[in-house]
Structures are given as structure tokens and as C-alpha cells.
Amino acid sequence: MVISSNALAYIAVINNYLTLLAAGDVRGIVSLFSPRGTVHSPFLGVQPVGKFFDLLKAATRRSIIESPEVFVSGVGSRRASTSFTYRWELADGAQVSFECVDLFDFDEQGLIEAMTIVYDTAPIRDSVGDKYRGVQTQ
């Protein structure tokens, strides 16, 4: 097993990301990404990081991150992930909770190049619908 020398830096970036996500700090989150950073979302497909998090913020009243765990590559790649329970209160007051895994690909400077979000969307759509439809950002 080969642990990247950047593993501790990746862990710090992901922990910072989770804190900023819970706070709804879009600018802070975007600062963790490379200028061409993307988010791969089950609901929204591939989006530029700023657009994705603007949409998320517009659809959200409150986010709570529970039981986060961070994992780094055992083969020395520039990849890490986190799993957590996401308690999401939507702008209309609807609430949903689900298990989520975010996969992070880092660039040579330690910025996030791409984040892939993995979760089962079926229960969410059944309980609250697609809350991104019709959302307006600033």
C-alpha cells in the first residue's frame, strides 16, 4: 500500500469542505476547487462548481452533516472520499436524510478538480420530489 504524501492535505481539504457545506458558504467551497472544477451530481449531471453550489444553496434552508469519515487512496493517487449522513432541510421546509459518498479528484496544487456525488436518488424523489426544478440563483 502506498499512501500519498498529500493524504493529510486531502483530508484537511475535505474536512474544510464539509464545514463549509454545512455553513452554506458557496464562496468558501468554490475556493477549494480548481478554476475549472466540476461537480458530478445524480440530480444535476455535470456542472461547474460555482453553478452547482449556487443551485444547492438556493434549494436549501439548512444542511447538517453527520458521522463523516474521510478515506484516502491506498495506491498513492490524488483521490480521496468522504461518507456521511446528509440531513437536508429544503427551502420549502421539506426535510430529507440520506447516506452520501463524495469522491474527490485533486490537481497537482491540491485543489479539487472534480467531485462526484454518490447516493440513491429514488427515495429522495419519492419523498420530496426534484427540488432543483425551477430554482433561481442570483
Image: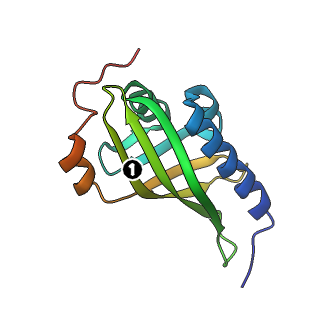
Residue 99 seen in render: yes
Numbered-mark total: 1
Viewer-closest of 110 and 20: 20
Outermost residue, bottom direction? 1
| Residue with the mark numbered 1 | 97
Residue 100: x percent and y percent?
45, 57
Q: Give the residue drawn at x 48%, y 55%.
A: 85
Q: Give the residue drawn at x 44%, y 28%.
A: 57
Residue 35 seen in render: no
Q: Give the residue drawn at x 55%, y 28%.
A: 26
Task: Check disc 1 and give the amino acid type.
Answer: Ser
- Classify mark 1: helix, strand or loop: strand
The quarter of the rendered structure image containing the C terminus is top left
Residue 105: x percent and y percent?
57, 57
Viewer-closest of 110 and 122: 122
Query: To which quarter of the image does residue 27 belong?
Result: top right
Query: To which quarter of the image does residue 79 belong?
Result: bottom right
